[in-house]
Image: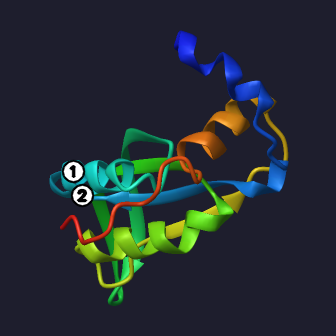
Amino acid sequence: MPEGYKAVRDVPVRMTDVMVVLTTVPAAHIDVLVRCILGKRLAACVNEFPVRSHYWWHDAIVDEEERMLIMKTTREHVQALIGAIRVVHPYEIPEIIALPVQAGFAGYLAWVALETGERHPVPEGNCF
């Protein structure tokens, strides 16, 4: 991590305060979604991976190229993050799953809490 993050180890964080949120999105919708999520500090980090999804939809099996987003946030921001995803997501029922982090490197978990915490108030307004 950059030099300025040495103080991260001083930020108290309980393991269950950090959450991982997963969603799959068509590639065309990634940029606006990621910029809004990070701009509003709803997540500290977003990872993007190409995936091929196979699922049932309207009595047919769908085979689709998508992007998997893995977002690290805090329990406090999960509902706002889900709301932001719903605004831009083109699917009627998008996959949005939030998982609690049970354990991890304390410095990283503290960094997630720091980057989404009170020192970075969420800007007002809709970014879509």
Q: Residue furthest bottom?
A: 58
Against 111, is 98 above or below? below
Instruction: Using the image as rendered, state which of residue 78 and residue 2 is in the foreground.
Output: 2
Against 51, is 92 above or below? below
Q: Specify few, some or many for label 1: CA neighbours under 10 Å numbering under 14, 14-19, or 20 or more.
A: few
Q: Is residue 105 left or right of residue 32?
A: right
The residue that label 2 is drawn on is 26
Q: Specify few, some or many for label 2: CA neighbours under 10 Å numbering under 14, 14-19, or 20 or more.
A: some
Secondary structure beneath dot 1 equals helix
Q: Is residue 29 visible?
A: yes
Residue at the spot x=24%, y=51% of the render?
A: 30
Residue at the spot x=59%, y=51% of the render?
A: 117
Against 19, is 77 above or below? below
Q: Residue furthest front?
A: 119
Q: Position of residue 99 (x, y in %)?
A: 68, 60
The part of the image, by quadrant, that contains residue 23 is bottom left
Q: Position of residue 38 (x, y in %)?
A: 37, 48
What is the three-letter code of the residue carrying label 2?
A: Pro
The quarter of the image holding the N terminus is: top right
Residue at the spot x=42%, y=60% of the render?
A: 122
The residue that label 1 is drawn on is 27
Secondary structure beneath dot 2 equals loop
Q: Position of residue 24 (x, y in %)?
A: 39, 59
